[in-house]
Amino acid sequence: MKHVTGCLMILVCVGLAGLRDATFVSGHTLPGAVVVALASVENSEQNLRDNDSNTLTPFDQSKGSEEDVEMTRRIRQALMADTTLSMNAHNIKIVTLNGKATLRGPVDTQDERRRILKIATLIVGLNNVINLLEVVND
């Protein structure tokens, strides 16, 4: 078990270092192993967007009031209750500040985008939703 844990730790370290091939002390090499693992989490462009000080992130929610937190909770609950929405739709970012809800992230279709907007609008009001959702598969 210790050997397996040690190997996993090495793979994580190699992955964080951004190396293409994992070479172990034993001399065994797993060509491309890290590349495959990293390819599925490549979202650098989206992360760069979060570095902009004008872009709201979930951390900004703490600046809001209890009412803002409650609105965010109600929107999230309504989205999770809709089992026809995709995993992407269930995982969008929702930040409510001063009564305005910002929705951001990828959704699978234009229809999902419209349905999420409708749900949020019913909770916070027509002029209180900032829709930054991006359709990725339509």
Image (cartoon, rainbow, N blue to C red):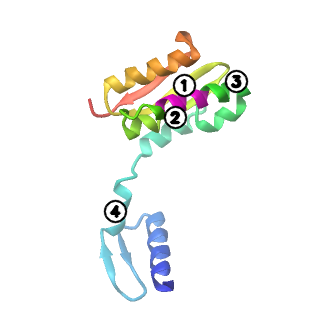
Q: Is 77 colored magenta in this rendering?
A: yes
Give the magenta part as a residue range.
72-79
- Disc on res. 102: 1
Establish if 40 lies above or below 27. above
Which of the two discs, 3 and 1, labels the residue nearer the N terminus?
A: 3
Amino acid on which the number 3 mark rests in the picture: Glu
Q: Which mark is residue 67?
A: 3
Secondary-structure class at tag 3: helix
Whether residue 41 is visible? yes
Amino acid beneath label 2 = Lys
Front-most of residues 36 and 18: 36
Verify CB contact (< 8 Å) between mark 4 and mark 1: no
> Which of marks 2 and 4 precedes in the sequence?
4
| Residue at position x 34%, y 55% in the image | 39
Query: Hey, which quadrant is residue 114 in on the image?
Result: top left
- What's the mark number on residue 93? 2
- Single out the residue that lies furthest toward the top: 127
- The residues bearing labels 3 and 2 have C-alpha atoms spaced at a distance of 18 Å
